[in-house]
Amino acid sequence: PTAKVNRNLELVYYSLGEIYARRGDPQAASENYRAALEIQPGDADASLGLGRAYEKLGQHSEAVTAFNAAVRYDPEFREAYEGLLACYQALNRAAGIAYARGMIAHATRDDTTAVARLKEAVALAPEWADAYAGLGLSYEGMKQSDDARAAYQTALKLDERNFLARYALGRLAK
């Protein structure tokens, strides 16, 4: 009955996912990463592994969901954005491609490029709260607090549960 909260068991499933991924068995890897995430849904590394496994299986939409889960817990997770980019390219989603390129630029501290790409993403998908939150992060990286605040506020108008935008606004208010 305690299996769903056992952190040691979560580590076992995660480790098995890693082993199967290295062996080239994305199906078995995905099963183990999913089991790890049932125990610890906030494990960004397991979400990354799951995204990679889905990508290898050609399940790009599922991979996008997994990669997005990874960046929800770590908004600077470059490897997850790289996975998103590959999947959005496979799905031919222009807004997603621009978003992923922008977030990769942000994660590598190239916020000028990030702002340009994220502006492209919000122009293509003006209702995408995460793109506005990413834009806020990039403006914040450029020390443009007013622009960052406006982008975060837009993200919250679009999705009042956007944790990144809410947390960032609180941080900027200090």
Image (cartoon, rainbow, N blue to C red):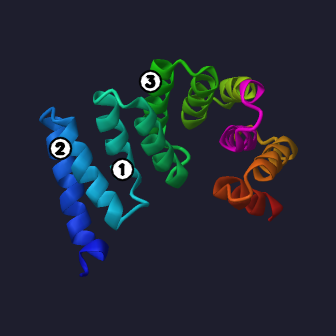
Q: For numbered disc 3, what is the local secondary structure?
A: helix
Percent coordinates x, y for residue 14 in the rendering: 24, 55
Q: Is residue 108 left or right of residue 145?
A: left
Q: Quadrant of residue 30?
A: top left
Is residue 125 highlighted in magenta? yes
Separation of marks 1 and 3 at Cα, in angstroms: 18 Å
Separation of marks 2 and 3 at Cα, in angstroms: 22 Å
Q: Which residue is mark 1?
A: 45
The furthest residue to the bottom: 1
Q: Are marks 1 and 3 in contact (CB under 8 Å)?
A: no
Q: In front: mark 1 or mark 3?
A: 3
Q: Is residue 130 above or below residue 81?
A: below
The crowding category of the residue bearing disc 3, from other C-alpha atoms within 10 Å (few below 14, some 14 to 19, many at least 20), is: some
Q: Is residue 38 above or below residue 89?
A: below
Q: Earlier in the sequence, mark 2 or mark 1?
A: 2
Q: For numbered disc 1, what is the local secondary structure?
A: helix
Q: Is residue 47 above or below residue 12?
A: above
Q: In front: mark 2 or mark 3?
A: 2
Disc 2 marks a residue whose amino acid type is Ala
Q: Is residue 170 left or right of residue 64?
A: right
- Write the start and end of the magenta stretch as one range: 122-140
Q: Which residue is mark 3?
A: 86
Q: Are marks 2 and 1 in contact (CB under 8 Å)?
A: no
Q: Are marks 2 and 3 in contact (CB under 8 Å)?
A: no
Q: For numbered disc 2, what is the local secondary structure?
A: helix
Disc 1 marks a residue whose amino acid type is Asp
Q: Quadrant of residue 8?
A: bottom left
Which residue is drawn at the image coordinates 73% and 40% (left, top)? 132
The kind of secondary structure the magenta stretch mainly shows is: helix
Q: Is residue 31 left or right of residue 143?
A: left
